Image (cartoon, coloured by chain):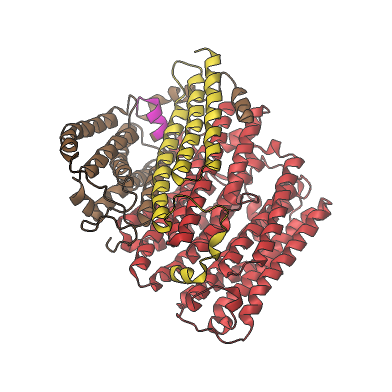
Amino acid sequence: MTFAWAIVLLVLLPLAAAALSFAFPRRGGWLAAGAAVGIGVGTAQLIRAVLADGAQIHQVGGWGAPLGIDLRADGLAVWMLLVAGINGAAVALYSSRYFGMERSEEGRHRERYFWPLFLFLWTALNALFLSADIFNLYVTLEMLGFAAVMLAALAGGRDALAAAMRYLLVSLSASLFYLLGVALVYGQCGTVDLRLLAAQAPAQPAPWVALALMTGGLATKTALLPMHFWLPPAHASAPAPVSALLSALVVKGSFYILLRLWFEAFQVRMTPAVAQALGALGAAAILWGSISALRQARLKLLIAHSTVAQIGYLFLLFPRAASPKAGFLGWSGGLILLGAHACAKTAMFLTAGNILHAVGHDRIKDLEGVTRGLPVSMFAFGLSALSLVGLPPSGGFAGKWLLLSAGVAQGQWWWIAMVLFGSLLAAAYVVRVLTHAFTSGSKPAILNPIPPVMEWTALVLAIVAAGFGLAAFWPAELLRAGAPQAMPFLAGGAAP
Amino acid sequence: MGALSWAALSLPAKPPGLAKASLDRLGESGVAHPVTAVLLNYRGYDTLLEVGVLLLALAGAWSLGRGEQPAENPQSRPLLLSLLRVLLPMLLLAAGHLLWIGAFAPGGAFQGGALLGGALVLLILGGLARRALKRERCLRAGLALGVLVFAGIAAVTMALTGGLLQYPPGAGGALILVIETAAMVSIGLALGLLYLGGQPPEGARRSLLATPPDHA
Amino acid sequence: MPDADYRLYLMASAAIFTIGFYSMLTQAHLLRRIMAFNVMGCGVFLLFITLAARAPGPVPDPVPHAMVLTGIVVSVCATGLALALAGRVQTVTGKTELEPGEDAGGRSGAAHHGSSA
């Protein structure tokens, strides 16, 4: 019963709020606040229920799979809900002032459309994390994609529109690859339920091809190298709170489905070769993303390229968690890293938005002395950089440490070198920003004052990112709670 | 393409689908047509999200600014108007018919909504929808109606039966009809208005893509 | 219907999807790419309804039919949205194509972003 009401709070409430904020455009901010409170309550209830009783299942309409759609909350799902909830709430708070700063017609127009699109995005994420049905996941994926693209286009202007157009075409094609895979799976197995698929584990060629199609589509949506080309322009040219949502949460939606496919529904197909291949793409993404981040002249572009690199880290989870030995270390390490990256990246983009608004540009070499004008924001940037690089006690450190421990236990040293080298590169690109910002050169004119809420929101998130390595046991415990039986490594690895 | 064809051809000739299961339980679904049963009952949750996607697409298009009133051709206008006089009542009637027969024959909210959308496009083309298009509040309310009614009924069924979209025994047919009616209005409006490619244009200025709107 | 006919449909769906995807990759005009997306979608839907028709029993499997209906509505929404966005791109940039390989808004620089962010 708890789960049933949590679904109302997590999916129906933001959906209704989205529709209402479209019908009453002036009330968008309040509706989002209401939805955020409801989502907070729903997530908290669900976490308690999962920790106490394990996975929760709800059969929509009372039919049950395979005829109906099942919704399911296990440790992984509620962890994702929590990450989305924290970042979503922070972005909502930030946006309540952000769009109001621009007292023009355009600013008002953006604010009016930001709220419904944002609420649809949040609905889609929550529905995605709770769904246990691969066709239903397709619908949530499309809702997520549409909302993300239109939010990215909200900035107007030629760069943002061209980037959004490219993003839309890529996203739509990728969705069709996924849907084609769903059709093949249904034709072979007669069900689209994750758990029933895991029980079937068919060996015919169709599921192989289906899995390849779905993985290709989802990896494109996650912007895994070499399908990352659409991400930096779209993320960098969007308004700051939107960039934060796109980098912190949207790419993780499709990543989450990849995890569900490879570690649950089709886990029999998770051969070492597949795991190593996905990991190798991740490693390449770390290198490419970090090096191109180093070469960016603008702060928002640097942060966007850093997202490409950080997505690479997430894919290191595949080779680490696929092994029965120490698999859980890799699994929880990758997912803790995911949460840490989300908070750090949101904080960074929000900070970049503050800088852009305060000094009128985000050219890195001209940021001298910006720290004196925006001390809170720059402190937030420094803290989130700590997590991005992976220094203790940040969440980034905890995640990387667990990934490394799994690598050591599995005796795979070259991956360890990769993680460490990636951290060095990350240190190089954030230090480049910090040296410019902390140099007391000619003080840049602070053109516009920044509302304190916008600075402190970024700081709180950065503190979460930089501090939650201290509490890394808790997410690991949560991730173990109610984990699907289909994930065999869960029995193997020792608790971190 | 080779791999794709190979995969498709390798699918079992007698697929283990859900045809039997969906027919066996048709009696409990409240409707007599299996596709409607899947759309609004077995997999009604998909449809709920999908009605949301439609509103989202329209909100997204409107977020781009104002669309264009299609240019009128004075020569073809009399022809269009006389066509509309015949076609419009028929389209409305057919939409209602499709909605009603959806319970036991091919049809339903989406098919009916598509006809309504077509009727709206014809009205716009004929220049007859100008006044209606200016009533933005009403349009917004009508567009949001489908999602709100559907989500509201989902929440109410939760309170009554403890299950999301689990209709109380015997009430399935009636509730599905309520949902479909509201959804049809919103679908028709959304499809018709998407044709404009943006928010409805303001009366005086025809093509204002560059200027963002000011009233809501 | 004999099974050979279904095989024709299965191969056709693979072919249609591939043709659509090929155009998506090779065409530059936005309208053509949006059409390519629709062609790809038709391939997927054809596969779904072929699966439905092959189902044993007196009537086709209604579940893939409902999925196709959902898919069609989503793809209509996507098309409407893509057309609106493409129209806007054309109004603002004067072009109906995206510039190949353009990486981010680096060239227009901070002036524009200062106003938009």
Residue situated in front as seen by the camera: C106 or A352: C106
Q: How many marks?
A: 0
Evaluate whether residue A244 shows in this view: no
In percent of the image, x 38 and y 63: which residue is there?
A110
Residue C39 appears in the picture as rendered:
yes
Residue closest to the far top: C2
Is residue C34 positioned above or below B95 on the image?
below
The picture's colour for chain A is red
Q: Is residue A7 above or below residue C16?
A: below
Looking at the picture, tell me which residue is in the foreground, B206 or A494: B206
Residue A78, image x, y percentages: 56, 53
The answer to whether A97 appears left or right of A348 in the picture is left
Residue A107 against residue A192 in the figure, above or below: below
The chain whose colour is yellow is C
Magenta highlight range: B31-39
Q: Where is residue A480 shown, x and y percent of the image?
A: 66, 51
Answer left or right for A100 relative to B200.
right
B101 relative position to A470: left or right:
left
Q: Which residue: 63% across, 31% down?
A: A207
Say which residue appears at 38% left-offset and 71% top-offset: A100
| Residue C20: % across, % down | 52, 35
* Picture quadrant where residue B121 is located: top left
**Apparent colour of chain B:** brown
Dominant SS type (magenta): helix
Question: Where residue A43 appears, x then y in whole percent?
Answer: 51, 56
| In-front residue for pair A316/B179 | A316
